[in-house]
Amino acid sequence: MRSRTSWLLILPTLLVGSLISAPGWNLNQVLQDPAKEPTVFRNVPLGTTFPDIELLNLEGKGLVFEPSSEKPTLVAFLRPDQEASLKLLAYLEKLALDSDSPDCQLSIVGMSGRRGPSWEDLGKALPRKIQLYLDAGTVSRTLGIIVLPSVAVLDSKGKLFRAHVLFDDDSPARILADLQVLANGEAAPLDEAEQARRRFAYLGLSADALEAVDELEGALELRMQQAELGVETPLALLNVGRTNFRLGRFANAVDNLRASIKLESTINAQVWLGRALARQGKLLEAETVLQGALPLSPRKAIVHRELADIFKQRGDLDQALVHMRAALAALNPVMENVESSHD
């Protein structure tokens, strides 16, 4: 029979591993969500003219990229050592050879990679319709690229109509749909509200990508820009609070989350508030907030895990163990038998 203390040492390790593999926690799925209309060009908001970017041809001669002025342009930024980039490359080759595909300019900007085939070798097999350029070392800085591969779809005026990040099974349909809309002349100009909404999505996705590589200060800057847009302000303040939490600035996080809840009280904001209060040592207030959020929270495992930590700090090992087991049971119903099997 294991003691309560030994289970409290073992269960957190099991829980962390379960959270990492739990459904709904895949960052790539978040980044690929088409509902967010994502873009990864921090310096190029949707609807604005794509800037001049300095590139090289395969012979090493410098040039400035010029999109078509008569038809849509697709520009893909790829790395030769990245599986997703190579899948996107294969799709672009297929698109170039398909006689039924929309009339558009297809361009690839080869970014540097640590391994994999050279762009010179890859370029030899490309259809003639695809223009291949090489990064001259300034592309990421000029555009503010965060994630690769990425795709910019430009209209015939050289403005960024849509941007796609990464590459999954649904990407070809989304890219093709954008090209067809532009080729048919159906793209309506964006009003101010739509521009703000897309800007909000762009900033959020960019911040998510920065957080994924632990560039939290940069992510916080973008999230604060989100909050200033006046679009979905409660969510924006929640996001600022989450990032401050991850930076260890718990007092700031509490202020952000309280402001979010004042505008719109959501379960997600309450959970983050409870976690921030707990990190400040305000255990009774944190418990009250988390207990209130628990019944409706879709992430009960996290709430139970936080409550287990709170009770452990207060010396109530019985309640700590109850919540730790509940956290595991929320992830895997089989774990509901843990208590009867190991008491």
Image (cartoon, grey):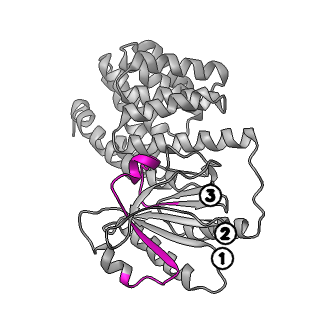
C-alpha gap between disc 2 and disc 3? 9 Å
Q: Quadrant of residue 251?
A: top left
Front disc: 1 or 3: 3
**Magenta segment includes 280:** no
Position in image of residue 28 (x %, y %): 45, 55
Q: Which residue is mark 3?
A: 158
Position in image of residue 202 (x %, y %): 56, 44
Q: Which residue is mark 2?
A: 71
- Closest to the observer, 295 or 150: 150
Q: Earlier in the sequence, mark 2 or mark 3?
A: 2
Marks 2 & 1, CB-CB < 8 Å contact = yes
Q: Earlier in the sequence, mark 2 or mark 1?
A: 2
Q: Is residue 39 above or below residue 155?
A: above
Q: Amino acid at mark 2?
A: Lys
Who's the residue at 38% across and 70% down the image? 57
Q: Which residues are magenta?
A: 124-151
Q: Residue 50, can we see it? A: yes
The circle on residue 103 is 1
Q: Earlier in the sequence, mark 1 or mark 3?
A: 1
Who's the residue at 50% across and 66% down the image? 168
Crowd around label 3: few <14 · some 14–19 · many ≥20 (10 Å): many
Q: Is residue 244 above or below residue 92?
A: above
Crowd around label 1: few <14 · some 14–19 · many ≥20 (10 Å): some
